[in-house]
Amino acid sequence: MNVFRHELRQRFKSILVWLAVMAVFIAAAMVKYDTFRGGGKVVNELLNSFPSTLKAVFGMSGLDLTSISGYIGVTYIFIAVMAAIFAGMLGSNAVAREETGRTVEFLYPKPVSRWTVLAQKLLVVGIGIAAMTVTIYATLLVVTAPYNIDSTTHAALVNFSLAALYI
């Protein structure tokens, strides 16, 4: 398990920074929700005036911006892009940093197979992705708490968080 701890120690700060940035982005996006909720009918009329292709490209078709789940559904495309970049960087760095991250020097005196090293590195990646999913879910719960969400909206928040895990 030395490889696992070594990799976790190396990636800990970068994972925390990514998670903090994602949480701040979600909180900042939710600050704008009061404006959309206050606008109500005007906001939905403005959204309906957009061409259907534009709404489809930005994932806004069929969503009500005055509801929490609709607003998060629209902003979720940005969260999904951040999650994809985060996961891609974690995965690529897990394999590419073997020489640049001094993992090779760490492993020279130890009889560990390459597959064991890769499995332990991917375990660290899995922990980072699980932490991202939990962070997204917890942040969504915290920022939507003042709006007294119902069970349907809570189910949508769970689905948004699980979608990040699948990404």
Image (spheres, rainbow, N blue to C red):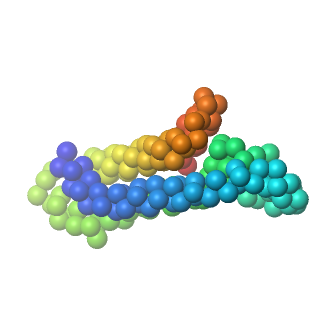
Q: Residue 33: image x %, image y %? A: 64, 53
Front in this rendered view, residue 81 or 33: 33
In the rendered image, is residue 39 in sight?
yes
Residue sticking out furthest to the top:
151
Q: How many labels, in total?
A: 0
Which quadrant of the rendered structure holds the N terminus?
Answer: top left
Q: In the rendered view, tell whether residue 150 sits above or below residue 115.
A: above
Q: Residue 50: image x %, image y %? A: 85, 60
| Image quadrant where residue 158 sits | top right
Front in this rendered view, residue 117 or 61: 61
Front in this rendered view, residue 118 or 132: 132
Q: Give me the residue at 70% from left, 50% from top.
A: 37
| Image quadrant where residue 54 sits | bottom right
Q: Residue 124: image x %, image y %? A: 33, 49
Front in this rendered view, residue 117 or 75: 75
In the rendered image, is residue 56 in sight?
no
Left or right for 6, reference 86: left
